[in-house]
Amino acid sequence: MELVAKLVTVLGTVAVVIGLFWAFSGFIDYLQGRKNKDKNKQDDGLESIIYGGVLAAVSASISAAIIAALNSITF
């Protein structure tokens, strides 16, 4: 059971990192769109920031909930 908990922790951490990178690249897209007055690139950047932040937050909480549920299982 400990191995499964560590695996879920690793997968949750990877998902958080992916979400944060997604938000960071969205921020860069937003700034480039703002600099060039490109509304479509700004909108795409804002979507990436939002979705990346949501992915990071949700994946962290879901992996924590899975680990808590795994730790509560007794035989």
Image: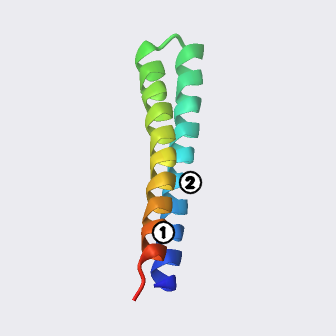
Which residue occupies 42% across, 26% down?
44
Image location of residue 65, percent across then percent down: 45, 60
- 22 shown above or below 34: below
- Residue closest to the eye, 62 or 31: 62
Q: Secondary structure at mark 1?
A: helix
Residue 55 coordinates in the image, percent (x, y): 45, 46
Which of the colour schemes (rainbow, by chain, secondary structure, one colour) is used? rainbow
Tell which circle, 1 or 2, labels the residue nearer the N-terminal end. Answer: 2
**Amino acid type at mark 1:** Ile
The quadrant in which the C terminus is found is bottom left
Disc 1 designates what residue?
67
Q: Residues within 10 Å of mark 1 (few under 14, many from 20)?
A: some
Disc number lying in front (1 or 2):
1
Mark sitting on residue 20: none
Mark 2 closeness class: few <14, some 14–19, many ≥20 residues within 10 Å: some
Residue at horizontal 56%, vertical 45%? 20
Q: Which residue is mark 2?
A: 17
Distance (Cα) linking label 1 and label 2: 18 Å
